[in-house]
Image (spheres, helix red, strand yellow):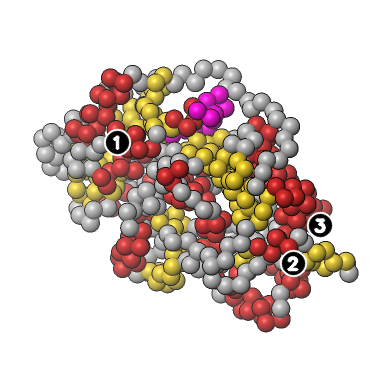
Amino acid sequence: MSKVKKSQTGNSISAMNDALQRFKPLLSEQNFHLLLGELQQPLQQALRVNTLKNADPAESVSRWAEMYGWQIQPIPYCETGWQIGQAKVPVSQPIEHRMGYYYIQDAASMLPVSLFKMDPSNSPLILDMAASPGGKTTHLVDRSGDLGFVVANDSGRDRITMLRLVLQNWGALNTAVTRFPGEKFGQWYPDTFDRVLLDAPCSMQNLRSTEARPMHTISSREMQTLSHRQQHLLWSALQAVKAGGQVVYSTCSLDPEEDEVVLDAVLERAGAAIKIETVDGLVPVSAAGLSSITADENTTVFHPQVGNAVRLWPHLLKTSGFFAALITKQQSLPVEKEPAPKVSSSLDLIPLKSRDARQITDQLLQCYGFDFKAVMEAHGLALWQRQNVLYAIPDAWWKYFNQLPFQAVGMRVAELDNGLTPSHEWVARFGDNFQKGVLVISGEQTTAWLRGEDLTVGIPAGMSATGIVAVRDELGRLYGRGKAGSSRLRNLLPNRWVVSG
């Protein structure tokens, strides 16, 4: 082990011991003993099935379990989530993961979005206030049926690229990615959203240290700073949601300063304007928020509603530590409204005329036997063009946020340089529905394909007027798109999907 890794491991163990000593008074002796026992076991991996690409999530995960030798256990509060026990093939390796048929996610992280009451038929307007890397955003997309419009915001410049890629891989249509301080949305867009998720930046004191996210010791001053920021973010979320709408506040920390203390402070400030809802029956164990804490012989008693939150200790359901609360906004809150920023120059996006849009959708129907026009109508999308690139952009964006600068919006559909060239994102989302324009490759060829190699194959005449085909294997699994020549299939896998070696 390198000196750096030894140092990281030592720091992580020290941080773990420090957290356990702080948390011990919060648990009964029996539960603390159970917690220590659970922390001796490795954290089970978990996955959440993409409902945009899997009509029957349970059937899909059962098929994968048989193919890859997985032991699976459903997650009780998330109907599309499963924990993975033993796995002959690691969950990160199958082509289904690479093509976005499921997302690898800690089971505890599936809790926040599961708390929302969601009716996709109402096309809800949703804000994910601190969205990166995007796992919970994809969960919001699924729970709204990709019919609600999701603004995925994150303030970190270095986290935006990952957020965009995750949403592209998921196949989301009704999303936009923005980069602003979450604290601003309440002033810019008060009483606007139907649902707001605030998975707040936190200290990650979840008692599950990993190599990628090792636990670290945090000072009381740092904790106070975090807690105050979390309160500001939550107040902004409550301002931004409509009266009658819902906010979920969550952290991957078990420290009360970031959890119950934040809720208590916001309840005191908002009064009867908000209500923390009970979530009885969703989590099948007793996991209530704390009623009080004692520090330095001083006891703080929280508002009774704070106990309605979910404090998910690792030993309860074999997860990481997690905290979440469902809040209903019952009436408007005071807001010092500010104008939202506006784009500084033209977006160069031009709406396609009805005749041109119809020609595009007719060609896609002819080439692939897939009615994209019907999809656009159902999801509230329109075709727009920027230079030679064609996008499907949600009508909701123009209705509510047309002048707000964005990092990405909608889906890239095709390029128009030399005719119509459907994008990887479009084929990856809808290729399973193609009735034509599909080329099947053998099991031996799939290995070469995933290495990014072109294939020499017999290609039927007139396979696709666009030259672009969806590539599947003999089991029906989608492998992206290729460009068909007379006897050569050019590999168009994005570099991020190519497997080296």
Instruction: Identify the element where label 2 is drawn.
Output: loop
| Mark nearer the viewer, 2 or 3 | 2
Instruction: Identify the element where label 1 is drawn.
Output: helix
The residue at 68%/50% (across/down) is 274
Q: Are marks 1 and 2 in contact (CB under 8 Å)?
A: no
The one of 158 and 193 positioned closer to us in this rendering = 193
Give the spatial CA distance, label 1 vs label 3. Answer: 55 Å
Q: What stretch of residues is rendered in magenta?
A: 399-410
Q: Is residue 409 magenta?
A: yes
- For the N terminus, the image quarter is bottom right
Residue kind at label 1, given as amino acid type: Ala
The residue at 38%/37% (across/down) is 379
Q: Is residue 338 left or right of residue 97?
A: right
Q: Which mark is residue 220?
A: 3
Q: Which mark is residue 374?
A: 1
Instruction: Identify the element where label 3 is drawn.
Output: helix
The local crowd at label 2, few if under 14, some if 14 to 19, many if 20 or more residues have their Cα within 10 Å, is some
The local crowd at label 3, few if under 14, some if 14 to 19, many if 20 or more residues have their Cα within 10 Å, is few
Q: Is residue 473 magenta?
A: no
The disc, 1 or 3, on the residue closer to the chain's N-terminal end is: 3
Q: Is residue 252 left or right of residue 377?
A: right
The one of 136 and 96 positioned closer to us in this rendering = 136
Q: Position of residue 89 (x, y in %)?
A: 37, 65
